[in-house]
Image (cartoon, rainbow, N blue to C red):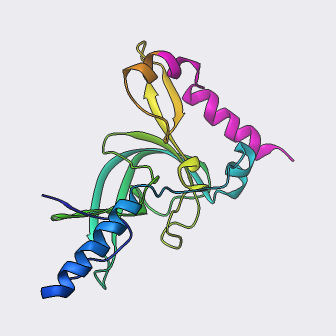
Amino acid sequence: MVKVINNMVRTRRSGAAAVVGGVWMLCLLMSGAAQALTVVPRPFPELVREAELIIVGTVSDAHSAWSADRQTISTTVSLADLEVIKGEVPSVPYELSLPGGVVGDTAQTYPGMPELTPGGRYVLFVRGNRRELIPLVGAYQGLYRVLADPDGQQHVLRADQGDNLVVRALVLPGQPTLEEFTRGIREELSAP
């Protein structure tokens, strides 16, 4: 069984305090299900302008760990097979630090925060890696998945949009190809 923490810390109590604490935690968990990450919509030129680093990369590894004070969990995602479009990568593979993750039987989640899966290929608009809680410009707006259509053509789809057979068959062909998308970023970078 996995214990899920939505931005809160587990506590242990005994006796009557445990009952009161349990009811309180249940209310928090029930209200937490309705919470979501709210972000200000960002136009594409703003994503490009505000990013310190724009890369295309494949997730080669992901490792979650507790913070030194054991209050939060973060996940370090390693990205390889990189194409750097803006900025400089300090090392390869590039390591991106994201909030949340799973350690042992405890999961810490941030509703609305997209996940990067091992083997997945992404376009990332990075700002504040290891300095900000969410190191992507506009949270999920700064993360795009690279998916292949039935013909093997790579398309780019914002990470908050679903990935299933219907999306791949109906939505994906209308999305820009990876080549078109990266060309659009480069054109935006060269604009006055």
| Nearer to us in this view, 41 or 3 | 3
Residue 188 highlighted magenta (yes or no) = yes
**Which of the 4 image quadrants contains residue 68?**
bottom left
Q: Residue furthest right?
A: 192
Q: Position of residue 21 (x, y in %)?
A: 25, 80
**Which of the 4 image quadrants contains residue 71?**
bottom left
Residue at the image position 55 percent from the left and 30 percent from the top: 178
Residue at the image position 68 percent from the left and 40 percent from the top: 185
Q: Position of residue 41 (x, y in %)?
A: 68, 49
Q: Residue furthest top?
A: 151
Instruction: Please name the predominant secondary structure of the magenta segment in the image.
Output: helix
Give above or below for 47 relative to 148: below
**Can you say which quadrant of the picture contains the N terminus?**
bottom left
| Nearer to us in this view, 138 or 129 | 138
Q: Position of residue 125 (x, y in %)?
A: 58, 51
Give above or below for 116 relative to 97: above
Residue at the image position 47 percent from the left and 52 percent from the top: 112
Give above or below for 188 relative to 26: above
Residue 29 highlighted magenta (yes or no) = no
Left or right of 99 in this view: 135: right
Residue at the image position 57 percent from the left and 25 percent from the top: 177
Q: How many marks?
A: 0
Instruction: Kindly tell me whether residue 161 is visible in this rendering.
Output: yes
Q: Position of residue 165 (x, y in %)?
A: 37, 21
Instruction: Kindly tell me whether residue 74 is visible in this rendering.
Output: no
Left or right of 189 in this view: 14: left
| Nearer to us in this view, 99 or 48 | 99
**Which of the 4 image quadrants contains residue 2?**
bottom left
Highlighted magenta segment, given as a residue range = 170-192
Give above or below for 25 relative to 63: below
